[in-house]
Amino acid sequence: MGLGFFAFGLTMILRPANVRANFDRFANSWKEDSWHPYKMPFWGLRLAGLVMIGVATLFFDIAYIGLSR
């Protein structure tokens, strides 16, 4: 899980336009034109990416503690 969160966080930081486009496609796949487009600014996506990397760090820490005992 840590690797997944870390990879998604890096993607949000390095390529926020791609993440926004994927969120739009996902929202539009459920019901055609029923959801408004994803309007989070790029700085918000990058901030969310930093939070995701923080969560990944917690998962890595939990795994390290669990495996070291």
Image: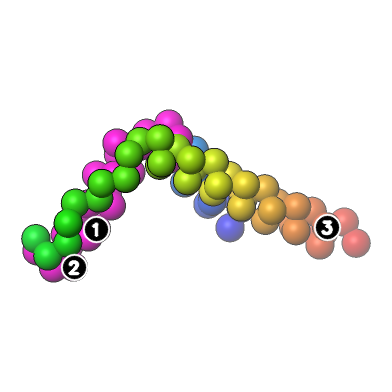
- Residue, disc 1: 26
> Could you tell me which residue is drawn at 29 percent across and 36 percent down?
17
**Range of magenta residues:** 11-32
Coloration of the structure image: rainbow
Neighbor class of circle 2 (other Cα within 10 Å; few <14, some 14-19, many 20+) is: few
In percent of width and height, residue 18 lies at 30, 39
Query: In terms of secondary structure, where does tag 2 sit?
Result: helix
Mark 1: amino acid: Phe
Contact (Cβ within 8 Å) of mark 1 with mark 2: yes
Query: What kind of secondary structure does the magenta stretch mostly adopt?
Result: helix
Mark 2: amino acid: Trp
Q: Nearer the viewer, mark 2 or mark 3?
A: 2
In percent of width and height, residue 3 lies at 58, 49
Mark 3: amino acid: Ile
Q: Is residue 30 above or below residue 36?
A: below
Q: Is residue 55 above or below residue 66?
A: above
How far apart in space, not on screen, are marks 1 and 2 (Cα)?
7 Å
- Residue, disc 3: 65
In percent of width and height, residue 28 lies at 16, 59
In percent of width and height, residue 37 lies at 19, 51
Contact (Cβ within 8 Å) of mark 2 with mark 3: no
* Front residue (pair 47, 55): 47
Neighbor class of circle 1 (other Cα within 10 Å; few <14, some 14-19, many 20+) is: few
> Could you tell me which residue is drawn at 69 percent across and 53 percent down?
58
